[in-house]
Image (cartoon, rainbow, N blue to C red):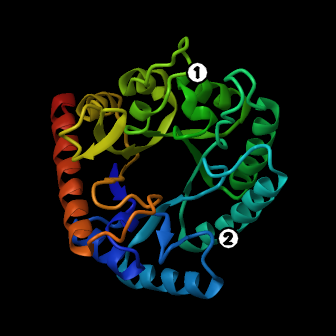
């Protein structure tokens, strides 16, 4: 098992991301944005500099936090799929260069003007199979995140994707269910239960994202991992009991949410919050290992 995280929440540049990772005593980064661009969208020159900096520091990228098929792209748009294929091919070349084995993908945005049973499933699955096959053919493992996408509509939708996209595995995000409508239930849809979602998909989880928080007056308020309502310790306990040996990746969202356009966060607070978050997650996982007798 290893710890990692979305270090772009601690610093925008690769030097800062490496520094905060090493301060935690970790050797992995889940790379998403560097200087404002996703790692698969950097120019070749910029990527070469990032790769050289990682090599020099002895830090590796364990997972690409890609934008492929994410909530910002529509399954209705051919141009979005074309962009996904370009990003997929570029990501493959860069993952091979860095020795990265995992890549986070999604299942396209939910079509808000259509009911859950009318979400262009056939097209979604066809496109996802093409993306996944390209990664698998290169010896790389795509993992689907339960976010604001088709698979994030509820645990049954995630399992349906696995049934229709061979070779795909899951990254379970602890924080996404609680602010997402549960379309496995009748309208008006309640918010999802993180424990229920996790238990339904646990056998397929190859990677974990950690966010915590609580819903207050219809808005998500993020907290440190032992202060929210998302049952992270309970999930950790179950993972440890199962013998989980994959990555645990922190995504604090405390000071800086990368897709939130509001203001420029204080860099000192970003760094301090990221480090404190990581240390708390380490302690929580150690407690789960103790309970499991590992």
Does the rendering let one see residue 294? Answer: no
Q: Residue furthest front?
A: 217
Report which residue position mark 1 lands on.
156
Q: Find residue 67 and report its horizontal and vertical position in percent.
A: 60, 57
Q: Find residue 268 and report its horizontal and vertical position in percent.
A: 21, 73
Q: Find residue 215 and report its horizontal and vertical position in percent.
A: 31, 33
Q: Residues within 10 Å of mark 1 (few under 14, many from 20)?
A: some
Q: Nearer the viewer, residue 68 or 56?
A: 68
Does the rendering let one see residue 260? Answer: yes
Q: Secondary structure at mark 1?
A: helix
> Is the Cβ of the residue at disc 2 closer than 8 Å to that at disc 1?
no
Residue 282: give its label.
none
**Residue found 57% across the figure and 45% down from its top:** 143
User: Which numbered mark, 2 or 1, is in the foreground of this view?
Assistant: 1
The first of marks 2 and 1 along the sequence is 2
Q: Nearer the viewer, residue 170 or 147?
A: 147
Quarter of the C terminus within the rendering: top left
**Residue found 41% across the figure and 79% down from its top:** 13
Q: Secondary structure at mark 2?
A: helix
Asked whether, in this view, residue 167 is left or right of residue 52, the answer is right
Report which residue position mark 2 lands on.
93
**Residue found 64% across the figure and 83% down from its top:** 44
């Amino acid at each position: 098992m290893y710890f990692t995280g979305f270090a772009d929440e601690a610093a925008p540049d690769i030097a800062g991301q490496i520094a905060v990772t090493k301060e935690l005593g970790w050797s992995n980064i889940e790379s998403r944005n560097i200087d404002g661009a996703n790692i698969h969208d950097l120019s070749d020159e910029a990527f070469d500099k990032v790769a050289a900096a990682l090599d020099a520091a002895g830090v590796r990228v364990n997972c690409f936090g890609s934008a492929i098929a994410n909530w910002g792209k529509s399954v209705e748009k051919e141009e979005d799929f074309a962009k996904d294929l370009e990003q997929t091919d570029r990501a493959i070349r860069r993952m091979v260069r860095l020795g990265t084995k995992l890549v986070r993908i999604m299942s396209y945005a939910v079509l808000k003007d259509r009911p859950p049973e009318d979400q262009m499933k056939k097209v979604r699955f066809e496109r996802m199979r093409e993306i996944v096959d390209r990664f698998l053919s290169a010896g790389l493992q795509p993992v689907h995140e339960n976010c604001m996408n088709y698979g994030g509509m509820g645990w049954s939708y995630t399992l349906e994707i696995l049934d229709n996209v061979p070779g795909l595995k899951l990254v379970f995000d602890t924080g996404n269910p609680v602010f997402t409508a549960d379309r496995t239930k009748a309208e008006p849809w309640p918010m999802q239960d993180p424990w229920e979602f996790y238990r339904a998909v646990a056998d397929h989880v190859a990677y974990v994202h950690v966010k915590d928080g609580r819903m207050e007056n219809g808005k998500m308020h993020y907290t440190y991992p032992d202060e929210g309502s998302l049952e992270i310790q309970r999930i950790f306990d179950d993972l440890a009991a199962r013998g989980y040996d994959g990555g645990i990746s922190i995504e604090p969202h405390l000071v800086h949410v990368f897709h939130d356009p509001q203001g420029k966060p204080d860099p000192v607070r970003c760094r301090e919050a990221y480090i404190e978050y990581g240390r708390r997650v380490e302690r929580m996982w150690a407690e789960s290992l103790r309970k499991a007798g590992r």
